[in-house]
């Protein structure tokens, strides 16, 4: 009856969760990082697409938690907890953080690598192990996670497709 | 970000007017360079979400040749010249006289890359000098940089600055069309100007609307 292969889309500075048999996807990651947190046994996963390393960089009163590595990963974990996932069961796969251009303003230089570092630091703080990663380089990525297999599919323009 | 609360349709209309002046100059330069009639106009100036910004350029996953440069001086911001790969091929083949040139080939010949960067230079230069004349502000473009990749990956780089302040961006979109002999517009491209939020007040003051 239902549509089996439905894909949940996650925008930039956005997050969502998914249960098998559906998959979850975000498109065109550049310096941004896509973080997948998943429970292998329950086959539930969440994805957040962050743009900046740290919420202290936010210069507005109201912040979008999904925009920053620290607040985004934490909020995603809370969303999954509300679905009955135990934080201890969570594992992570991450992709993105490339350097698309070699220059920028002082705030944007090395933003990709800085995002990756911040993501790893926050996952470490929350004791969530990183099972696989595809980060850095200078290519954009579109990623899709399948909670049934716990696999992350990564597509690039110049380097083909892979699964991690 | 308090100034984005004050941005009204009137402000956006003024930016549209400025954008059209810049676009007219850039179109003239491009027409001369390619010896073809090129039309450039500003369909809209909008305050959009980041995802909507990608949609304007064809969607986050669309593969494009993107030229990125920063604006410095009295105001700061990012500029993008985004062409679908087929359109970029069309322009560059004409410029360098090599019908085999292809932006989707893994090893790009240097001459095509240089030509594309030069195209970005000429377009942004004429656009910004018109903007500078009109506003009285000193504006300088940095050297342009080229990437052939997904819209989301390329354009998000120019949104990093804005993202510190807001989840929305003022986009001065400029559509590029070429009129061919058959009268069909064969090239479709976009030219985006994204002022940094810290420059919004500077721009509107220089235009006498704030």
Image (tube, coloured by chain):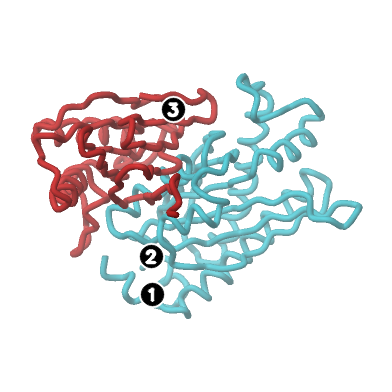
Q: Classify mark 1: residues with Cα within 10 Å, few (<14), some (14-19) or many (20+).
A: some
Residue shown at the point (21%, 27%) measured from the top left: A130
**Most foreground residue, A56 or B193:** A56
Q: Classify mark 3: residues with Cα within 10 Å, few (<14), some (14-19) or many (20+).
A: some
Q: Secondary structure at mark 1?
A: loop
Percent x, y for residue B176?
A: 69, 55
Relative to B143, say whether B35 is above or below.
below
Q: Nearer the viewer, mark 2 or mark 3?
A: 3
Asked whether the viewer can see residue A149, the reply is: yes
Circle 1 sits on which residue? Answer: B7
Q: Nearer the viewer, mark 2 or mark 1?
A: 1
Image hue for chain B = cyan
Q: Looking at the rendering, in which quadrant would you find the C terminus of chain A?
A: top left
Query: What chain is tagged by disc 3?
Result: A
Residue A8 shown left or right of residue A16 in the figure: right
Q: Are marks 2 and 3 in contact (CB under 8 Å)?
A: no
Q: Which mark is residue A138?
A: 3
Do the residues at discs 2 and 1 belong to one chain? yes
Q: Are marks 2 and 1 in contact (CB under 8 Å)?
A: yes
Residue shown at the point (46%, 56%) measured from the top left: B194
Q: Secondary structure at mark 2?
A: helix
Residue B114 shown left or right of residue B92 in the figure: left
Image hue for chain A = red
Residue shown at the point (35%, 25%) measured from the top left: A134
Q: Which mark is residue B200?
A: 2
Picture quadrant of residue A70: top left
Of the numbered discs 2 and 1, the one sitting upstream in the chain is: 1
Residue A49 shown left or right of residue A159 in the figure: left
């Amino acid at each position: 009856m239902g549509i089996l292969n439905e894909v949940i889309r996650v925008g930039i500075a956005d997050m969502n969760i998914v249960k098998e048999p559906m998959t979850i996807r975000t498109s065109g990651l550049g310096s941004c990082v896509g973080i997948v947190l998943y429970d292998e046994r329950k086959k539930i996963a969440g994805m957040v697409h962050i743009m900046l390393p740290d919420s202290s960089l936010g210069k507005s009163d109201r912040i979008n938690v999904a925009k920053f590595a620290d607040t985004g990963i934490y909020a995603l974990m809370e969303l999954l907890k509300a679905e009955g996932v135990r934080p201890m069961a969570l594992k992570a796969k991450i992709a993105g953080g490339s350097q698309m251009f070699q220059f920028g303003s002082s705030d944007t230089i090395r933003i990709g690598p800085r995002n990756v570092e911040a993501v790893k630091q926050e996952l470490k703080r929350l004791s969530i192990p990183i099972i696989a990663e595809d980060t850095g380089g200078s290519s954009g990525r579109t990623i899709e996670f399948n909670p049934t297999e716990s696999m992350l599919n990564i597509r690039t323009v110049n380097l083909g497709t892979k699964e991690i | 970000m308090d100034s984005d609360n004050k941005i009204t349709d009137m402000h956006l209309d003024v930016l549209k007017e400025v954008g059209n002046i810049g676009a007219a100059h850039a179109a003239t330069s491009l027409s001369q360079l390619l010896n073809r009639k090129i039309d450039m106009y500003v369909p809209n100036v909008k305050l959009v979400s980041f995802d909507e910004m990608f949609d304007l350029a064809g969607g986050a996953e669309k593969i494009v040749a993107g030229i990125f440069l920063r604006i410095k001086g009295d105001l700061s911001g990012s500029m993008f010249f985004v062409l679908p790969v087929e359109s970029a091929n069309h322009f560059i083949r004409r410029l360098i006289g090599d019908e085999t040139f292809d932006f989707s080939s893994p090893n790009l010949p240097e001459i095509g890359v240089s030509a594309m960067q030069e195209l970005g230079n000429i377009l942004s230069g004429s656009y910004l000098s018109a903007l500078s004349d009109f506003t009285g502000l000193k504006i300088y473009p940095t050297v342009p940089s080229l990437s052939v990749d997904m819209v989301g990956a390329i354009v998000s780089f120019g949104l990093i600055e804005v993202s510190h302040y807001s989840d929305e961006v003022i986009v001065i979109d400029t559509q590029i069309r070429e009129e061919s002999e058959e009268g069909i517009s064969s090239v479709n491209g976009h030219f985006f100007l994204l002022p940094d939020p810290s420059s919004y007040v500077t721009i509107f003051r220089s235009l006498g609307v704030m």
